[in-house]
Amino acid sequence: MMNYLINMNRHLRITILLSCFFGSFVLFYFTVNSLFMFAAFVFLGILIASNVSHARKLSDVMDKTLEKSIIKNKIVADHSYLSDDFLSGIAINEKEQRIALFKRNNINEELSPTLFNFDDILEVGIKEDNIIVTHASKTSAIGNAMAGGVLFGGIGAVVGGLSGEKVGYTKVYKVSLLIVVNDLNNPIYEINFLNSKILVDRDSEIYKDIYYEMSKWNKRIGVILKRNELNTRTV
């Protein structure tokens, strides 16, 4: 029964179980029969459990699409990551000094990679909703607010993190890693580490785990930028 619900269309499953939940609650209200209240909480529990199981199964399936694209395109990856919405990804090969950035329009398409050399990476930043919280460029370890604003969101962008500034809000919907590359057609790649329909508290374990993982990627790209800068100075 649970497997059937997990594999069911998500919207249909939610509609059916919520209808059962509210139906049981209404029956309890009119009959004061505790069995209907118990049934209501059972349906609610099934809804939560099936949604969690469905999300995990989908995540496992989507992770395999990134692995499939890496293998199909003969990419050697020391590190790889698939975005929270499964629409973009990243893979790094340190020995060959190359980075693969993946994109697709929907989860039914194959992930399409674009390969860049390390010296093609120009900037990296972390964006929370519409605010840039860290930013580093090829020419500076910290960069500046004007460069970050132009490349990552226009006037009003706030650059902090690396320069020690704090962001004055407690909850977010979306947290992304932005990478600027030497490509006039597609200069900015955005990889969502969190893309939620509900606000996520920045003090929550979910946010902390997400930010920890994204910070590792931000630092990896930062190391590449620093190496690019050092190589430029020695030439």
Image: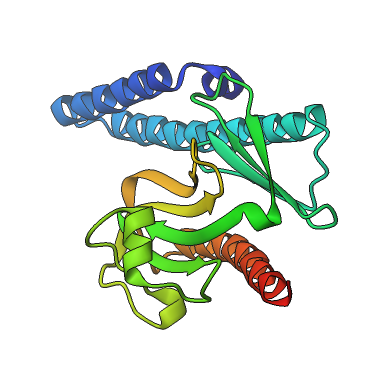
- At 53% from the left and 33% from the top, the residue drawn is 87
Q: Position of residue 197 (x, y in %)?
A: 33, 41
Farthest residue, direction front: 235
- Which quarter of the rendering shows the N terminus? top right
Q: Quadrant of residue 18?
A: top left
The one nearer the camera, 109 or 207, is 109
The one nearer the camera, 156 or 164, is 156
Left/right placement of residue 226 relative to residue 148 reads right
Left/right placement of residue 192 relative to residue 169 reads right
Left/right placement of residue 167 relative to residue 51 reads left
- Which quarter of the rendering shows the C terminus? bottom right
The one nearer the camera, 182 or 193, is 182
* Count of marks, rendered view: 0
- At 30% from the left and 68% from the top, the residue drawn is 158
Answer yes or no: is residue 132 visible. no
Q: Quadrant of residue 30?
A: top left
- At 55% from the left and 38% from the top, the residue drawn is 88
Left/right placement of residue 30 relative to residue 152 reads left
Q: Position of residue 228 (x, y in %)?
A: 67, 66
- At 67% from the left and 76% from the top, the residue drawn is 233
Q: Quadrant of residue 62?
A: top right
Answer above or below: position of 104 versus 203.
above
Farthest residue, direction bottom: 164
Answer yes or no: is residue 121 visible. yes
Answer above or below: position of 23 versus 58.
above
The one nearer the camera, 74 or 141, is 141
Q: Position of residue 195 (x, y in %)?
A: 41, 44
Q: Position of residue 38 (x, y in %)?
A: 36, 35
Q: How is the image coloured?
A: rainbow
